[in-house]
Amino acid sequence: MELSDLTTQAGEWLRGSGPMSDIVISSRIRLARNVSGFPFLTRCTRTQRKTLEHKVRDTILAARLSPRTLYVDLESAPEIDRQLLVERHLISRPHKEAEGARGVAVGENETLSIMVNEEDHLRIQVLRSGLQLEEAWEQINAVDDQLEATLDFAFHPRFGYLTACPTNVGTGIRVSVMLHLPALKLTSEIEKVFRAAKELRLAVRGLYGEGTEATGDFYQISKQTTLGKSEEEIIGEFKNLVIPKIIDYEHHARKALLSERAVALDDKVWRALGLLRSARLMETEETLVALSHVRLGVNLKRVKDIEINKVNELFLLTQEAHLQRILGKKLEGDARKAARAEFIRQRLSAD
Amino acid sequence: MKCEKCNRPATVHLTEIRGGKKIEKHLCEQCAAQVEGFPSKAHTPINELLTNFVLAHSGLAKEQSSVCPECGMAWADFAQTGLLGCEHDYTAFDKDLTPLLQRAHEGATHHLGKVPTRRGGTSVPVKRQLDVARLRKELNRAIEAEDYERAAKLRDQIRDAEGQ
């Protein structure tokens, strides 16, 4: 598989299918693992880092985790390719920006990605659309087993899987969902979610993880505890206690908008659609905001002539690396904004 | 349309019904954030908060002399970066780490999840120990919930696991 195969279609996480996908965009589970016998990355020499990367890469490729696994050497990959992987949620921003030997393995349908030499030696991730946490766990657990057949992971009988940061020690698991909560934002009730999340020791982040803003009304909610509970318990609590509550809040806010402020809602939605269908220069941020309102309109059947997939895809394909890859040229400033606006107009009028 | 409070473009449009009267407001994101409590920024990442909190509360700022014999990492280095140097640090800094882990993980200090199956022959006893710990915890919960049928089953499972 080539990196260019990824460009033209939406990533698994934005396919907009799967259970509860009107609100739950995607489910993600990651496992942090380190190879025993090598220092953690802050203490690795350049040579150790390189040896480790090769060892892990070879193990991943030999394990045949998916029919056609792509491995990208991020030390030599050009900026635009690394940005493309960030936009598709296959690598983190710090992994894109880091230096030294590092890489990422991507499974064929992009549900699986393994970052090599990020904060830990391995960061295994499974990303699936809609609410599919149990399926994600099954998949990632199997991958972990397969890798463990060759790699000796650092493990302590009391502390569990050992990680560079003690906030990840134990299971090394991070369970999260990406939620689209436009109605809670419009009704100013999103603070309720933040408060509830805080009480439940959950982190709320933006579209691109740690330190990013909640652009386009996307919120990534994740569980922070990794020690003292089994993986199944952590996933079960998150899925059964936390997520349904937030989904309920959003449904409630959507209903309230429809019954009490339908005109204001329609105004938001159609204004956004008007912007997307008419504007000549579009910035990333305003594109995401407008798409978010249109997505709400389509999900509430206020807009009927646009498929939800088309909206979902645009969230991804209008981002800088995707846009430039699709158009096959480097674009800066107004030229990029103009190209984005044109691309959106074409996509939204093609029906 | 311009924001009612300042001259920036209005991007937040609110319609409220109060006492049968319709009130419309047109605000920019910044003014809306003040007036209506619209969050304009995502929260500070919890990891960061957590690390800061933990570092501030566990006396890490004090001089510490422990050094990991394997990687040479000093406890003070960890206090600065929040990242450990190697797997042996967990043994070297065991005492210092335990209270920190308790704060970060809702009081927990013991792993109760997956165990690698190939751990140079130690895997089976380790796994069994952890299974027993987990069953005990479930047993306590069952007793608290007065689910005695389940408690009896769990007691048998513990007996089986320990007897192996």
Image (cartoon, coloured by chain):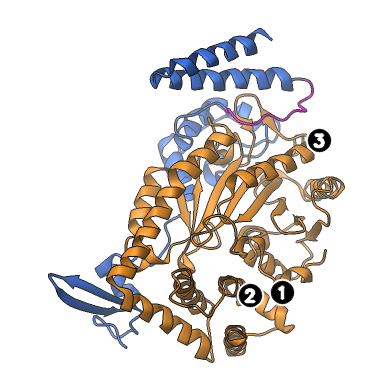
Chain colours: A orange, B blue
Image: A37 above or below A286: above
Q: Chain of mark 2?
A: A
| Residue furthest left in the image | B19
Image: A182 above or below A54: below
Q: Quadrant of residue B68?
A: top right
Label 1 residue SS: loop
Dot 1: few (<14), some (14–19), or many (≥20) neighbours within 10 Å? some
Labels 2 and 1 in the same subunit = yes
Q: How far apart in space, not on screen, are marks 2 and 1 (Cα)?
A: 8 Å
Say whether marks 2 and 1 touch (CB < 8 Å): yes
Image: B69 above or below A85: above
Residue under pointer 2: A317
Say whether marks 2 and 3 touch (CB < 8 Å): no
Q: Which mark is residue A235?
A: none
Residue under pointer 1: A8
Q: Chain of mark 1?
A: A
Residue under pointer 3: A149
Most frequent secondary structure within the magenta stretch = loop
Amino acid under label 2? Leu
Query: In the displayed structure, does residue A173 sit left or right of residue B138?
Result: right
Instruction: Name which of mark 2 and mark 1 comes first in the sequence.
Output: 1
**Location of residue B122 in the rendering, given as x and y in whole percent from the top left corner:** 74, 20
**Residue A216 in sight:** yes
Question: Residue sitting at 35 percent across and 69 percent down?
Answer: A186
Amino acid under label 1? Thr
Query: In the displayed structure, does residue A96 sit left or right of residue A183?
Result: right
Label 2 residue SS: helix
Magenta part of the chain: B111-121
Q: Is residue B115 magenta?
A: yes
Say whether marks 1 and 3 touch (CB < 8 Å): no
Dot 3: few (<14), some (14–19), or many (≥20) neighbours within 10 Å? some
